[in-house]
Image (cartoon, grey):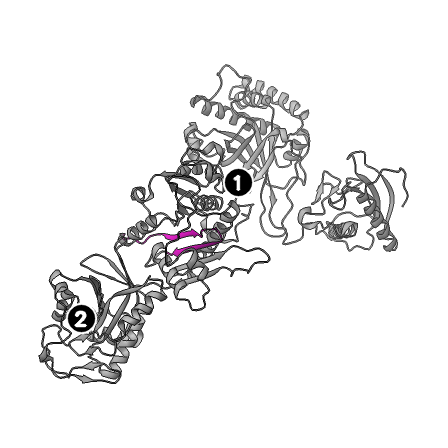
Amino acid sequence: MKDSTTPELTEGQQLALDQLHRIAQASQGSMAATHVTASTGRPGYVEARISVGCANLPRTQGALRLRSVEAVTLLIPPNFPFAAPSVRTRHTRFAGAPHVNWGRHLCLYRSTATEWDPADGMYGFVNRLLDWFEAGAAGELDRPGEPLHPPNALTDHTAGLLVIRRDAPVARPDGPWLGAAVLHQVGDTRSDVVGWLAVEDPWPATLEQLRQTAALPAGARAFLAPAVVTTKHLTFEYPLTARDLVEALARDHITSRLLLGLTGFVADHNRTLLHLDGDAQDEDDEDTPAAPVHLLLGTPSRGIAGDGPRQTHLVAWHLPDFADQIGRLAVGTAFSGRPYLAELGDEVIQFGTEWLDRLPTRWMRIYEARPEVTVRRDQATPAAWLRGKRILVLGAGALGAPVADMCARAGAAHLTVADQALVHPGILARQPYTDADIGHFKASVLADRLNRIDPHHTRVEALVGDITTRLSELDLHPFDLIWDCTANRIVRAHLERARRTDIAPWPHLATLMIGHHATRGLAALSAHGATGGGADVLRRTALAAHTDTTHTFDDLIEDFFPTKPRTELFQPEPGCSDATFTGSAADVTALAGQLVTGVLYALADPADRPTMATLIVRMPASPTSTQPAGPRWLTWPNDTLVTDKATGYDVRITPAALAEMRAEARRGARVRGSRVETGGTLLGVVDDATGVIFVDEATGPPPDSLLTETYFRHGLDGVGAHLGARREATGNISRFLGMWHTHPHTAAQPSATDRAAMTSLTLPLDDAPSRALVLIAGGPESVWHKWLATGDGPDLYAHLATRTASAAAEPPSPQLPARLGPVTWWPGGYATRPHGPVPFPRKARP
């Protein structure tokens, strides 16, 4: 390698040249490095000229015209290998070919951030260059199946910025598309393309109509920009002068006359719209345009190589204000029916054409956001489920604020945030508010911020006030998902009751909770159509944690479901501030993200969606600590629902409890006969706040029970011990609830004996409560046999019985009426009476 000058080299550049030297030595003459010099165009860079042998590369018709030896210049940056070199030719023979910028620069990488490996150095770069020449010789710079590289335009940052939000029009088969882009002016230098108007379409007569056409809010600044879409691809790089651009457009029959006329027509319409809106300058000020003059140019240059029609690629040329005046003069004269004006207009257009010939192009920066050419970064994630949905977030605090932010960024169509709290200084440690927000309502501040994320797709509104009272103002049914992020028992109970009493099915409900030190989180999911809400699912979670014999969930019991109230509470501000949890913004955001992602995973697949479920997540510990278990789901099927008509309460019977009742009924039919009643104890709880009676477990009859075809008397043997054991095992969550019995082959309705027992509330307990659930399973012969055979539900009757004052004063006699006849004892300690006449008119036999 021969140096004509001796540039001062950095350590990285010296490494690059050493590697080039070794590559040239190993190439056996197919590559030579001949010249090294300091770059004159890029300070700090070193230029190395190399020659690459291409004589043996397979050629195809229509491919690049490669010489037997191609000479190129490598530009090596001073911080090599942590910045990739670039390469340019010493000729313009490749100009216009794909992946050739500005006639000379070869584009070897689509993304250096992901494709350039510093460890490969010049070895990887030269291999990439050889691959480029091989693809060029084969005519496969755009290989079939790969995305086409769009044309380049050298942008001028002072020309402004356009964000393209609406899919672009395409040219007609017989000619270019002509019209205007609808622009929403977001700032002094930025506008968003939010719609398109073809010249043959009816154009809005007022600015308000234009806003409605583009779905813009009232008061939004909007205007039109002339737009042209060609029928053919023009070039791989857009020219730097207007003359070259006009010459390129002329090949598609787009002339200077047409461009100036379209610009003038749009400028006139802008002045009309903005003047009627009272937003334009004085009509006498003819030199100042009513709106910025941007010319949008589209070409069919995007898509997949070899795969069908191409999509429109867009660039935007920012024209000087003078273009507005020339265009309006041209359209007002050249296209007039009066010969004198038309002749004058031709002179204006001639002047305008000469002016364009001397004008440089100023290409605006373009950011693509239109669905047809962009792919959302979250498209393959569970968050994609949120796009276009209506979401309600209850609570705008440590959990609610990040959850609402996630929904807005995922593209939810409508988001309502409900909270009554104000921003105060202490919450800034972990909630996304600022010092300027102190004293303002959280919901309002959060809604204002979220509305700025994607105002074209997501609308966020605040609901300020007490959630338990303000929810009545909302129609909840249009929502797709409700996030309860309040960590408030009152809110959960209110939601459970409201959900229970609503005749229409509720949307999905996710209830999120964080532990006292932000090391654990729970997400309770009640899917659309689930029998229980958040309070119900969390109660199930507590039962599962307490009754798990492996002690997997002991940490959850301590954090969320302790048997005794916590005595150590964290109160961050003095006085009467709410007790909360310790945890940083990092802790809360990490837990919120895991919980939200888990819930969305569950919702994303309807075929595999659980009806009720809880996700458990735990934060990582220090490297030397015992590592916590990973995320885990607990799932439950729907309960069997019965309504106590006297109270209106829901009776929710778990599948396990109903299965135990069926198992006992089947066993009784085998052992004692198909018409002998049986029954047992129910465990659960009555929740008067929500109006729900939870039936968690059912047991069979104690050994000293009396079973007949007409009567079931619940025994006492072992009942107290069993109930005590279950209370302890469940952390006092599930306790004695009542009794169940069967009416085989007959209606599930109380007999006279049952009604008398309900009145006196005869219970197998020394400390019997004042209320108990009476549950009867029965049904006609076909229903009864089907339940025993297949498990299809029987007819059920439920009543929450209350002991009367007189019954409470007189202990019930444990003896049955004497006329029931002598007792016969069956194996297992159960007693029955002989089959005979029914002493009380209670059931009609089939």
Q: Position of residue 237 (x, y in %)?
A: 68, 38
CA neighbours of label 1 inside 10 A, class few (<14), some (14 to 19), many (20+): many
Q: Nearer the viewer, residue 510 or 451?
A: 510
Quarter residue 422 falls in: top left
Q: Earlier in the sequence, mark 2 or mark 1?
A: 1
Give the vertical position of 707 relative to 149 (above or below).
below
The quarter in which the C terminus is drawn is bottom left
Q: Secondary structure at mark 1?
A: loop
Residue position for label 1: 169
Q: Position of residue 818 (x, y in %)?
A: 9, 79
Magenta region, residue range: 502-527
Q: Position of residue 813 (x, y in %)?
A: 13, 72
Q: Name the residue type under label 1.
A: Pro
Residue position for label 2: 747
Give the vertical position of 575 relative to 610 (above or below).
above
Q: Name the residue type under label 2.
A: Ala
Which residue is depicted at the point 26% across and 83% down? Answer: 828
In the picture as drawn, the residue positioned furthest to the top comes out as 284
Q: Nearer the viewer, residue 771 or 421?
A: 771
